[in-house]
Image (cartoon, coloured by chain):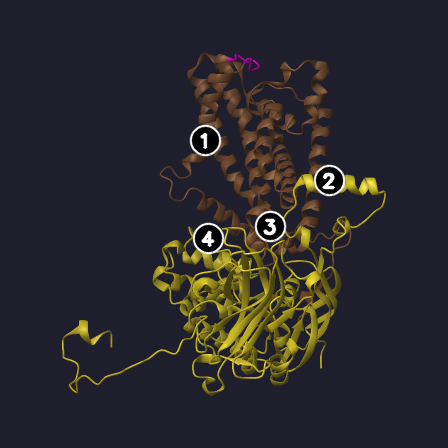
Chain colours: A brown, B yellow
């Protein structure tokens, strides 16, 4: 005879208000989280010839294109850094943001079939995107370091750049990017579940957002009196910060960094709440 | 007795019909401004003045003691699936609450979350985790699952290379080895082959009898319900119509107004469905050579009768009929012109009928769709789900196949012949002819 274990007691009732967040339960599903990370990683490049090499090739090709168009043709200054390194360092943080944003923003709609059949804390899926994109980040970091060594040793630009002590902040900056991309991704995921219009918008958003972020230009190119606007974009500081860490050039101000951090945290918290609210009944509307 | 394992109190679920499809931002904005102009806070659905809300569940209350197998029956749209969705926490109720003491898992998601690129081994872990097992639990059951699914040799092959049979076996093995306190089974018997159905039912039986687990079983297969369940909840338009011992409730379901209700429908001219060309005033399904309310069995010939006004003089009235199984699968499609050419119809009231021979449909519920047109393509008026017919199985062949129901939507009487060909033993050494024995 099975005794109903009280530790599993569940009460199902309508969601009232916004705060029905069960993080403890999400933690119980941590095995699922890591299996989803594994799935993302294994499934992504199955049946491709180059496999995980794409993690490196894709940003490398982007960098080459940027170097030709923005560096070579448009001649946008790069803070005196070799353009290749400038773009690689900028893309390092940006790509992590963009990829996590894109996979987490499709969470609800892409998994509608699964969510309509079985219950588990929905937050596990976007969280798995945050983690699995860390692999891509690590590979791109390795690539940046490889180019860094090459430029240092074999080119005349070797004296123009170098690590800065700020690199100890890298984990925090990475955490901020993760929080921000998850927050914005959850917002968009919830909005897309309600209004499909946002499926079309997410591609645009990410494109425009990149041009609003100092990836292809340095923040120092923006006149001082307009800089506060650029800094309202919470990705500005992380991208500049990563450049300082690895290349020693960039514009980071403590107050701006704090502002960007608080905006990110705010977006994350509100994103979780909105996602949580929508997720309860979204299967009724798909 | 301890507290019930499931306690449901006044559970209700409202759907807004307008919202069944995702709305676009524009509609939302329009509503917002409309609300603004009206200066009155109204709920979304009421804006157009139409009643666009439906209560899929209304004040459902029941409780289930641990270890009981409870069947849930009712017509399509009675709210069975909605109830299960709420209990398995896929969607929230609108009001009321349910208290559940234990983990819940359902067999309705066999194979859900399988990833084609992953190997059998990886999918077992992933699927187990999706269904709520921890890695350690899956590990402990791993060998059992593999043995049950009979896929040892293909464990490290991506499941996209599996045959569909292997795929289903593996998926079912994972689901069947969950150890939830409460198991939900929703119409799994509708999918898969007979062997698979037998396995499902066998597993359910052992889960409930030997392991003492609680099972909620939703099915249209009354024979299976009768043989497995102690108690049955009969649902009707979102409410619990009756709860009681399985035999009593299934009999009530078969004989109650449930059937006739749906076998005929009539409207006054003013609220009859239709358009500027047609008004449909009555649809009726009657068994041939019997009382109008007599049950229709598999062998019974019945006719579908429709009364309608033709409002356009000399129209080429064309009627179409589509009969669907309760899974939505079309069974057949018929046109009123099948008997011959279609002449012009003067204005007036008509009665058309279509005779469906006995020994054609299998037991089950069939939905009737009707289309009225004046011959112009894609200009027909459709009447969907107005009536349906419940075909009962013949009494003399109960339990002939497993749990009573033939596979498929049709069950024609076919001629079988067997001739005695030779009295010798099968020739030796000829494996091709002797088969796999």
- The span picked out in magenta is A74-80
Q: Is label 2 on the same chain as label 1?
A: no
Tell me where residue B79 appears, x and y as whole percent.
65, 66
The reply to whether residue B129 is visible in this rendering is yes
Q: Report whether A266 appears left or right of B277.
A: right
Q: Which residue is mark 1?
A: A58
**Mark 2 highlights which residue?**
B30
Cα separation, mark 3 vs mark 4, equals: 17 Å
Which element carries disc 4, helix, strand or loop?
loop
Tell me the number on the disc at residue B115. Answer: 4
Chain under numbered label 1: A
Q: Left of A52 or right of it: where is B272?
A: right
Judging by the rendered image, the residue that carries numbered circle 3 is A124
Residue B219 in view (yes/no):
no
Crowding near the residue tagged with mark 1, few <14, some 14–19, many ≥20 C-alpha atoms within 10 Å: few
Question: What secondary structure is marked by label 3?
Answer: helix
The residue located at (53%, 14%) in the rendering is A160
Is A79 contained in the magenta span?
yes
Q: Chain of mark 3?
A: A
């Amino acid at each position: 005879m099975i005794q109903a274990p009280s530790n599993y007691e569940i009460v199902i009732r309508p969601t009232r208000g916004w705060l029905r967040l069960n993080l403890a339960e999400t933690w119980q599903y941590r095995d699922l989280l890591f299996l989803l990370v594994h799935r993302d990683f294994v499934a992504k490049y199955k049946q491709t010839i180059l496999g995980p090499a794409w993690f490196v090739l894709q940003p490398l090709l982007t960098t080459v294109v940027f170097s030709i168009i923005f560096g070579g043709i448009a001649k946008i200054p790069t803070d005196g850094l070799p353009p290749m390194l400038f773009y690689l360092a900028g893309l390092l943080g940006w790509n992590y943001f963009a990829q996590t944003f894109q996979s987490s923003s499709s969470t609800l709609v892409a998994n509608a079939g699964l969510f309509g059949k079985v219950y588990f804390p929905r937050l596990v899926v976007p969280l798995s995107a945050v983690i699995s994109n860390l692999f891509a980040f690590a590979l791109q970091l390795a690539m940046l370091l490889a180019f860094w060594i090459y430029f240092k040793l074999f080119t005349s630009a070797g004296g123009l750049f170098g690590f800065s002590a700020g690199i100890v902040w890298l984990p925090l900056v990475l955490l901020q990017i993760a929080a921000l991309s998850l927050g914005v991704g959850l917002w968009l995921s919830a909005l897309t579940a309600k209004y499909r219009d946002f499926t079309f918008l997410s591609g645009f958003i990410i494109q425009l957002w990149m041009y609003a972020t100092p990836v292809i230009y340095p923040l120092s190119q923006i006149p001082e009196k307009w800089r506060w606007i650029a800094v309202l974009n919470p990705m500005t500081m992380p991208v500049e910060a990563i450049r300082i860490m690895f290349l020693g050039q960039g514009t980071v101000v403590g107050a701006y960094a704090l502002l960007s951090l608080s905006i990110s945290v705010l977006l994350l918290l509100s994103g979780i709440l909105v996602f949580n609210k929508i997720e309860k009944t979204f299967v009724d509307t798909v | 007795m301890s507290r019930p394992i499931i306690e449901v109190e006044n559970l209700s679920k409202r759907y807004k019909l307008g919202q069944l499809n995702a709305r676009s931002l524009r509609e939302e904005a329009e509503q917002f401004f409309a609300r603004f102009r009206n200066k009155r806070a109204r709920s979304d659905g009421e804006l157009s003045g139409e009643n666009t809300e439906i209560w899929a569940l209304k004040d459902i209350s029941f409780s289930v003691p641990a270890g009981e197998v409870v069947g849930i029956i009712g017509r399509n749209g009675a709210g069975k699936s909605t109830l299960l969705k709420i209990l398995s926490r896929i969607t929230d109720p609108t009001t009321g609450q349910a208290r559940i003491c234990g983990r819940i898992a359902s067999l309705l998601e066999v194979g859900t979350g399988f990833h084609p690129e992953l190997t059998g081994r990886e999918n077992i872990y992933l699927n187990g985790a999706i269904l709520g097992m921890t890695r350690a639990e899956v590990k402990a059951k791993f060998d059992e699952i593999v043995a049950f699914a009979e896929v040892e040799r293909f464990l490290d092959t991506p499941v996209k290379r599996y045959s569909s049979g292997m795929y289903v076996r593996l998926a079912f093995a994972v689901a069947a080895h969950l150890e939830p306190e409460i198991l939900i089974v929703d119409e799994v018997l509708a999918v898969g082959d007979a062997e698979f159905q037998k396995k499902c039912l066998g597993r359910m039986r052992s889960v409930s009898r030997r392991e003492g687990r609680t099972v909620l079983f939703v099915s249209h297969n009354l024979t299976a319900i009768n043989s497995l369940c102690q108690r049955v909840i009969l649902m009707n338009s979102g409410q619990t119509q009756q709860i009681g011992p399985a035999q009593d409730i299934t009999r009530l379901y078969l004989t109650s107004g449930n059937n006739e209700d749906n076998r005929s429908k009539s409207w006054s001219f003013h609220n009859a469905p239709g358009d500027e060309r047609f008004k449909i005033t009555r649809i009726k399904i009657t068994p041939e050579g019997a009382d109008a309310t007599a049950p229709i069995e598999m062998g019974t010939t019945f006719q579908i009768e429709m009364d309608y006004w033709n409002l356009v003089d000399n129209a080429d009235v064309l009627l179409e009929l589509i009969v669907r199984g309760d899974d939505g699968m079309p069974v057949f499609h018929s046109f009123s012109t099948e008997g011959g050419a279609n002449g012009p119809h003067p204005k007036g009231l008509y009665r058309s009928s279509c005779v469906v021979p006995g020994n054609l449909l299998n037991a089950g519920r069939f939905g009737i769709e009707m289309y009225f047109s004046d011959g112009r393509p894609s200009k027909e008026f459709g009447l969907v789900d107005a009536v349906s017919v419940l075909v009962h199985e013949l009494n003399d062949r109960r339990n002939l196949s497993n749990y009573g129901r033939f596979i498929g939507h049709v069950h024609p009487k076919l001629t079988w012949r067997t001739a005695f060909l030779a009295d010798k033993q099968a020739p030796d050494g000829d494996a091709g002819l002797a088969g796999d024995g």
